[in-house]
Image: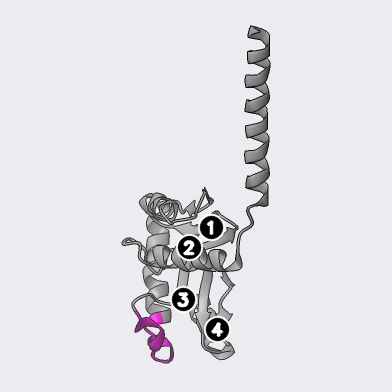
Amino acid sequence: MVIRFKSLGLFIAITLALSSLALAQEREVSPKAVERIQKEVRHELVMLPFLTVFDNLAYKVDGFNVTLLGQVTKPVLKSDAENSVKRIEGVEHVDNQIEVLPVSPMDDGLRRRLYQAIYGYPALRRYAMGVLEPIRIIVKNGRVTLEGVVDNESDKNLVGIRANGVSGVFQVTNNLVVSK
């Protein structure tokens, strides 16, 4: 009799485990849910208090999982980004692949000069008028990566030329995207 109860208990436990596994596999992510999560992730990231023009945050949403990407100048920004995205309803897992850029007085000087060369140039000043500048300036060991969005191809080329003209820059990678 004791053996039957143990067998019955084991059978029930296995059945419950298999049915919950089947339910988890059947649960599909609706496009609206993914769209909502994407909107909320973007909102949370742009609202981070220490986010500057020298930080680049990106993300990928795969169902209920979010992967954080990019580069930041302050370690607190990496952890703040992860913590704010974890609190979004529906997000089950956050993979934080954000790179914290090394501390470097030389790179800090380059960042200031690059900002002035790009955002201080009269033809590009309109990009500095928003709350969140659309051109991100990422500097790592003298190498510059430009990320973000500009209005046209000539602005993209002009930003690249301005960045290449700053003394102390070893290399410029222009990843700017032209908006449609």
Label 2, residues with CA under 10 Å away: few <14, some 14-19, many ≥20:
many
Q: Earlier along the polypeptide chain: callout 4 or callout 2?
A: 2
Residue 7 lies, with reference to residue 54, above or below; the image says: above
Find residue 4 and report its horizontal and vertical position in percent.
68, 13
Name the residue at the front extreme. Answer: 1
Numbered badge on residue 135: 3
Find residue 53 and report its horizontal and vertical position in percent.
40, 69
Alpha-carbon span between mark 1 and mark 4: 23 Å
| Amino acid identity at mark 3 | Ile
Alpha-carbon span between mark 2 and mark 1: 6 Å
Q: Earlier along the polypeptide chain: callout 3 or callout 4?
A: 3
The residue mark sitting in front, 4 or 2, is 2
Query: Looking at the image, which is closer to me, 18 or 34?
Result: 18
Residue 167 seen from this side: no
Helix, strand or loop under label 3 = strand
Numbered badge on residue 69: 1
